[in-house]
Amino acid sequence: MSSAIEAARLRFRASGRQIVCHPSVLPAHLNRLDCALALPGAEPAQGALADLFMGCCDAPAADKLDALHRVHPRLTEPMVRSFQVQAPLHSFPRCSRMATRWSVLATASLDVPRRVLRCSTDDSHQLAAEALRAWQRGDLPAQQAFLTHCLVCRDTLALMVARRSLLRLTPELPRPWSEAFAQLQATVLPS
């Protein structure tokens, strides 16, 4: 992990402690959103936004929507719509699909796809990128570790992202990759 990311992570954690001590202070939440945006991926920003919606549930909808606008590029459209629906409300569920492992006030719901419980979307994308680099280096043990992860955790997202990138570089998948893909398809879509 680079020192810049580590420093950003430390700032994000410190801002999280401020949120726990002062959960309804909007400027503290906005500072935490800025810290989250210095980190890679969507999860930190989404988790911080869920905490803002929970801690500042009585804030005007315009303030919540401004915060959502800050992190909008990091979120999926369905998640953006979920936050938009929640903005005018003066309550936020303690346990929510909008919260992430990075949330400190709200709790991430278990009512998510099984894969998400084992591996976040951000992690899946990172693992896929690492697997592609392993293929480019010819690192067979790293490739096999990735394929094993995909099969054990049923991480279809990581395998699909890596597969798509790999097929841009080679006309057909290497045999272990195609076998893992077929096996994962069989477990996800039983015939």
Image: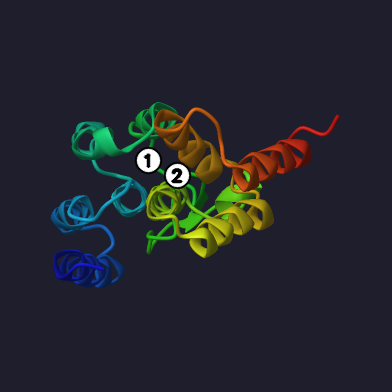
Which residue shows up at 18% across the image and 35% down it? 66
Task: In this rendered view, identify the residue nearer to me: 88 or 12.
Answer: 12
Which residue shows up at 77% across the image and 37% down it? 186
Q: Please give the residue where the numbered disc 1 appears in the rendered image.
A: 90
SS at circle 2:
loop
Give residue 3's quadrant in the image: bottom left
- In which quadrant will I find the N terminus? bottom left
Residue 54 seen: no
Local crowd at mark 1 within 10 Å, few (<14), some, or many (≥20)?
some
Local crowd at mark 2 within 10 Å, few (<14), some, or many (≥20)?
many
Labels in figure, total:
2
Position of 185 with respect to 133 (left or right) is right
Q: Which amino acid does label 1 sit on?
A: His
Q: What residue type is labelled 2?
A: Met
* Place of residue 53 in the rendered image (x, y in percent of width and height, measured from the top left): 33, 46
What colour scheme does the image use?
rainbow
- In which quadrant will I find the C terminus? top right
Tell me how far mark 1 sits from mark 2, CA to CA: 16 Å
* Place of residue 88 in the rendered image (x, y in percent of width and height, measured from the top left): 34, 31
* Place of residue 109 in the rendered image (x, y in percent of width and height, measured from the top left): 56, 52
Give residue 86's quadrant in the image: top left
Position of 35 with respect to 116 (left or right) is left
Residue at the far right in the pictured view: 191
User: Looking at the image, do the residues carrying marks 1 and 2 touch, with CB atoms under 8 Å apart?
Assistant: no
Residue 71 numbered mark, or none: none
* Front disc: 1 or 2: 2
Q: Please give the residue where the numbered disc 2 appears in the rendered image.
A: 98
155 shown above or below 88: below
21 shown above or below 41: below
* Place of residue 21 in the rendered image (x, y in percent of width and height, measured from the top left): 26, 72
Residue 108 seen: yes
Give residue 168's quadrant in the image: top left
